[in-house]
Image (cartoon, rainbow, N blue to C red):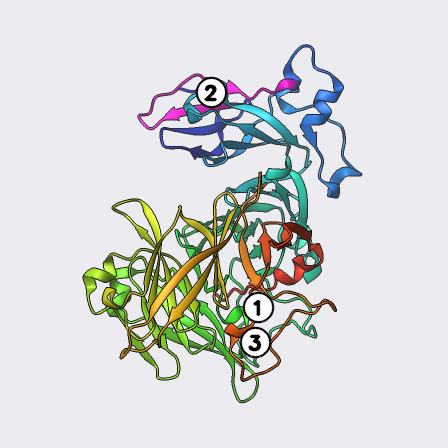
């Protein structure tokens, strides 16, 4: 169906009804899933109109700071020539189409409500004059665009801020230049948009967090005397994967595996396994010596041994649970670090680290009715954010750790919708809904939490806040103690006193996609904390 001398030059992007292809003549071709071809079309913008002005064109073209000094003012491809479209990327959630041209310019386009099949609704909003763009990838949840360049670097742009440039990521600080890596060939975001993988044409791949923390890299550490260099054992075989370059990468549905195809060995697919940190709570936010990671079917306990070397203990989730509820989706540790709550696709199990015992639901029917979307510990109580499929609603379930059964359920709290962030501090629970509605609850327990008593739990709302017109949703939120006059966070200096005797927290530390902010919900004031962005970015780890 394509005209003579016209060929497909790009990958394909698709929605539920159609797919889109980039052509060698600079046009886009829409094909339905029934193999019906519509007329090809060319991307247009307001700069194409006959009465365009220089101001209109300047407003449409954005240069990243890394190239601003050397950027040449070139007209947009839709106005001048027939450059081929070599890469397309579609975000259905953002109604955004990204097209990369053979002259390395990037078009950001809006898509109509009817999707790709309505070609008249696809129009260029902005051009990124990167000068050497090779590929792109969109993080729809974080509203971030990653652009891979022929210089071997990745440029990040904030789509919520009119494609404002965020940062440039490269391996230069680790001793590798573009001569070593070659251009960027592929980028793939994790399903939760917390990290992304980058592959290069000549050699290797790397995984970065949004804040720029390098989580994993196939390159050997440059400089054997570096403090970050891994110890190489004598007579050990030196092997580096993807030495022939990386042509394609793709995460699995849950972000536990990264699949890569080597440039020089396209018949072989490599799989890298990853573990995740407990992002919102757990030992990653305390001073315990043990760190908690989790994979698709196991928990990883990272702790020092007698020689102060880190060792990893693999705690396999019982097959009786994991075989029916694979994979592990949520893990959270209690405040004392002695109990773990683990949830898969259905149900919930608890693990006692001190006694090395698992606790299950006695009734499998009850277990299968729980679809956990979030976990928290409140003292000896585990809180489950449960999705009720029959009514399409969400609720908080409060179970005592000594008995998993609906007969022991302490409280059931219906929610307004699906929470995007939850946290616990002292006797207070924070629940945040989309786009940015914050609810804080107070928990009161009457009676002893034990199998021989009948405790009563009461839940009351103490604060409701709505952040108007947020540019992006929060990634993580944490209730923190109130600072003293000297600026030091209040702490209970009496070790024997109970945590509940402290005053309730009035501050929320919020991690946005671009950095943390501090919300004082007493005075309703927001403080920028850009100096903490780098430190927050280190609260993550990758193990492959």
Residue 44 x/y as whole percent: 58, 19
The N terminus sits in image quarter: top left
The secondary structure type at the circle numbered 3 is loop
* Label drawn at residue 503: 1
The secondary structure type at the circle numbered 2 is helix
Height in image: 73 above or below 350?
Answer: above
Q: Are marks 3 and 2 in contact (CB under 8 Å)?
A: no
Instruction: Tell me the residue that label 2 is attached to.
Output: 119
First in sequence: mark 3 vs mark 1 = 3
Q: Are marks 3 and 1 in contact (CB under 8 Å)?
A: no
Instruction: Tell me the residue that label 3 is attached to.
Output: 287
Q: Do the residues labelled 1 and 2 touch (CB within 8 Å)?
A: no
Q: Residue at x 68, y 48 (%)?
A: 167
Q: Which residue is drawn at 68% across and 49% down?
A: 168
Residue at the outermost front position: 446
Viewer-closest of 319 and 228:
319
Q: Left or right: where does residue 355 sit relative to residue 489?
A: left
- Rate crowding at label 2 as few (under 14), some (14 to 19) or many (20 or more) other CA atoms within 10 Å: many
Residue 170 x/y as whole percent: 66, 53
Q: Which residue is drawn at 48% across and 69% down?
A: 282
Viewer-closest of 253 and 273:
253
- The verdict on residue 41 being magenta is yes
- The verdict on residue 407 being magenta is no
Residue 387 x/y as whole percent: 33, 51
Q: Left or right: where does residue 75 sit relative to residue 186?
A: right
Distance between the alpha carbons at the discs numbered 3 and 2: 55 Å
Distance between the alpha carbons at the discs numbered 1 and 2: 58 Å
Q: In which quarter of the image is residue 45?
A: top right
Viewer-closest of 3 and 494:
494
Distance between the alpha carbons at the discs numbered 3 and 1: 22 Å
Is residue 123 visible in this depiction of the protein? yes
């Amino acid at each position: 169906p394509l005209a003579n001398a016209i060929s497909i030059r790009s990958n394909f992007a698709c929605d539920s009804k159609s797919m889109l292809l980039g052509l060698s003549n600079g046009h886009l071709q829409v094909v339905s899933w029934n193999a019906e071809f519509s007329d090809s079309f060319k991307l247009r913008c307001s700069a194409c109109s006959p009465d365009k002005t220089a101001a209109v064109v300047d407003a449409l073209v954005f240069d990243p700071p890394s190239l601003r000094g050397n950027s040449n003012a070139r007209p947009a491809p839709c106005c001048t020539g027939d450059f081929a479209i070599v890469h397309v990327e579609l975000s259905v959630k953002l109604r955004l189409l990204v097209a990369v041209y053979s002259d390395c310019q990037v078009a950001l386009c809006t898509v109509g409500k009817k999707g790709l099949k309505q070609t008249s609704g696809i129009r260029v909003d902005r051009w990124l004059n990167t000068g050497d763009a090779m590929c792109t990838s969109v993080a729809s949840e974080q509203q971030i665009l990653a652009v891979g360049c022929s210089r071997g670097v990745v440029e990040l742009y904030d789509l919520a801020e009119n494609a404002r440039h965020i940062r440039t990521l490269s391996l230069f600080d680790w001793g590798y230049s573009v001569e070593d890596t070659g251009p960027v060939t592929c980028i793939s975001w994790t399903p939760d948009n917390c990290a992304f993988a980058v592959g290069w044409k000549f050699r290797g791949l790397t995984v970065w967090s949004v804040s720029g923390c390098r989580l994993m890299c196939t390159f050997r550490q440059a400089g054997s005397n570096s403090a970050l260099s891994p110890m190489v054992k004598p007579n050990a075989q030196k092997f580096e994967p993807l030495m022939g370059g990386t042509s394609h990468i793709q995460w699995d549905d849950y972000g536990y595996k990264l699949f890569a195809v080597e440039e020089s060995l396209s018949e072989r697919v490599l799989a890298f396994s990853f573990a995740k940190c407990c992002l919102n709570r757990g030992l990653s936010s305390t001073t315990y010596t043990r760190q908690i990671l989790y994979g698709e079917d196991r928990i990883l306990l990272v702790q020092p041994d007698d020689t102060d070397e880190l060792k990893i203990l693999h705690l396999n989730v019982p097959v009786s649970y994991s075989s029916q509820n694979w994979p592990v989706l949520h893990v959270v540790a209690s405040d004392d670090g002695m109990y773990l709550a683990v949830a898969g696709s259905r149900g919930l199990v608890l693990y006692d680290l001190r006694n090395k015992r698992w606790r299950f639901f006695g009734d499998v029917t009850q277990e299968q009715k729980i679809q956990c979307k979030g976990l928290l510990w409140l003292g000896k109580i585990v809180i489950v954010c449960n999705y009720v499929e029959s009514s399409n609603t969400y609720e908080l379930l409060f179970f005592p750790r000594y008995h998993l059964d609906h007969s022991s359920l302490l409280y059931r709290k219906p929610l307004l919708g699906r929470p995007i962030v939850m946290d616990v501090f002292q006797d207070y629970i924070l629940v945040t809904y989309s786009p940015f509605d914050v609810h804080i609850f107070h928990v009161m327990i009457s009676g002893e939490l034990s199998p021989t008593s009948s405790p009563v739990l009461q839940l009351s709302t103490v604060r409701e806040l709505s952040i108007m017109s947020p540019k992006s949703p929060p990634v993580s939120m944490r209730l923190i103690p109130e600072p003293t006059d000297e600026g030091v966070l209040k702490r209970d200096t009496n070790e024997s006193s109970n945590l509940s005797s402290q005053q309730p927290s009035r501050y929320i530390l919020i991690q946005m996609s671009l950095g943390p902010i501090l919300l004082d919900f007493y005075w309703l004031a927001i403080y920028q904390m850009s100096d903490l962005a780098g430190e927050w970015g280190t609260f993550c780890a990758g193990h492959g």
